[in-house]
């Protein structure tokens, strides 16, 4: 478990809330949240659990998300909340904590999940799909009581931390409220089963590789939220106009290929090409084990810097 620290003067009440026990995996070997994430991150978290620091203000969004779960659990409204489901896979205990379960008018179970999240995440719901479809699989494959209902729907209750009322007024398709219920695609049961085994096998293989030689399989581009380098064609006129207004001018076009960008800009002396380096957004800003990760250290040049010291 990460050690809570207070580097930025958070009040004692928030520090106490951060230190309170909010999570219990129920003695499972691996959870759904871990399964859908990178094996490397899980292994490094286990290895360096006593070294990871969790600053109250630096991780305040996660703390707010935890508070939302706690409040919703206390006021369930007559539905099943925060139930942890266990099944056996490959001799291991796999579990997932389902935020909300209720029966719809058709007599089918609906699984719901609270998310304190961003507008961007609504445009890329793949992680939501992965998580809730595994919850569905667990729920339907546990030891079933006689009155068990099959799952007929998945929902995310998204509280949008970056919602803007101005954008809601003028942008088509923008959420009209800072909280929205999002229907999540329910997969065929065979696809759920295949995905569960795929993720389980990936983690099991990573554990075996680590136990035999100490190596950890690298994170994928998707797991690192990696953005490739781009080449932005910019306008000198547009940049000067924006600067007068105290803003930054937008690029005219953005290309993934340097030659295409050069070709677009070559016939207009006012245009120039700006190289934008790629980045691994999660590694740099949101990974709590980046400091222990040799993959990140090599990418960011930290290994070279240490060798030159």
Image (cartoon, rainbow, N blue to C red):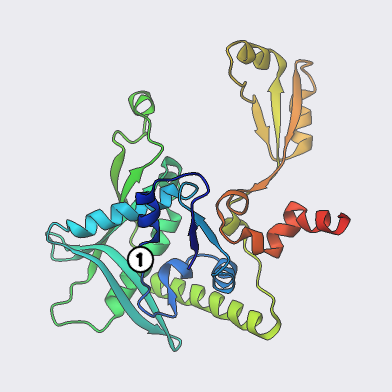
Toward which corner of the image does residue 135 lie, by quadrant?
bottom left
Q: Position of residue 156 (x, y in %)?
A: 31, 53
Q: Position of residue 84 (x, y in %)?
A: 30, 72
Query: In the image, is residue 82 above or below residue 93?
Result: above
* Nearest the eye: 214 or 185: 214
Q: Position of residue 159 (x, y in %)?
A: 33, 45
Give the residue at x 71% y 64%: 294
Residue neighbourhood size for the residue with mark 1, other residues' Cα within 10 Å, grouped as few (<14), some (14–19), many (≥20):
few
The secondary element bearing badge 1 is classed as loop
Q: Position of residue 107 (x, y in %)?
A: 13, 66
Query: In the image, is residue 221 above or below residue 181?
Result: below
Query: In the image, is residue 93 above or below residue 55?
Result: below
Give the residue at x 22% y 71%: 150
Residue for badge 1: 21
Toward which corner of the image does residue 262 lie, by quadrant?
top right
Q: Is residue 155 visible?
A: no
Q: Is residue 306 visible?
A: yes
* Nearest the eye: 68 or 194: 68
Give the residue at x 34% y 28%: 165
* Nearest the eye: 252 or 75: 75
Give the residue at x 45% y 51%: 56
Q: Is residue 215 left or right of residue 28?
A: right
Toward which corner of the image does residue 168 lie, by quadrant?
top left
């Amino acid at each position: 478990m990460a050690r809570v620290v207070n580097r930025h003067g958070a009040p004692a009440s928030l520090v106490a809330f951060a230190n309170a026990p909010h999570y219990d995996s129920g003695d499972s070997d691996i959870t759904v949240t871990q399964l859908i994430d990178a094996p490397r991150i899980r292994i490094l978290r286990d290895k360096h659990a006593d070294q990871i620091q969790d600053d109250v203000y630096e991780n305040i969004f996660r703390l707010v998300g935890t508070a939302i779960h706690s409040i919703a659990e206390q006021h369930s409204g007559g539905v099943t909340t925060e139930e942890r489901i266990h099944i056996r896979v490959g001799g291991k205990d796999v579990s997932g904590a389902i935020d909300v379960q209720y029966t719809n008018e058709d007599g089918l179970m609906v699984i719901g999940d609270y998310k304190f999240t961003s507008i961007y995440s609504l445009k890329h719901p793949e992680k939501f799909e992965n998580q809730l479809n595994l919850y569905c699989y667990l729920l339907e494959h546990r030891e079933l009581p006689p009155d068990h209902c099959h799952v007929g729907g998945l929902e995310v209750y998204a509280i949008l931390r970056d919602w803007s009322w101005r954008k809601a007024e003028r942008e088509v398709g923008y959420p009209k409220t800072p909280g929205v219920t999002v229907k999540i695609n329910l997969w065929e049961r065979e696809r759920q089963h295949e995905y569960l085994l795929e993720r389980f096998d990936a983690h099991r293989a990573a554990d075996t590789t680590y136990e035999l030689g100490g190596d950890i399989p690298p994170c994928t581009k998707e797991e690192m939220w990696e953005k490739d380098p781009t080449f932005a064609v910019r306008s000198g006129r547009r940049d000067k106009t924006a600067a007068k207004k105290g803003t930054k001018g937008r690029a005219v076009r953005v290309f993934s290929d340097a030659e295409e960008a050069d070709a677009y800009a070559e016939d207009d002396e006012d245009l120039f090409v700006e190289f934008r380096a790629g980045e691994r957004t999660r590694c740099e800003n949101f990974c709590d084990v980046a400091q222990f990760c040799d993959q990140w250290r090599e990418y960011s040049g930290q290994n070279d810097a240490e060798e030159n010291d």
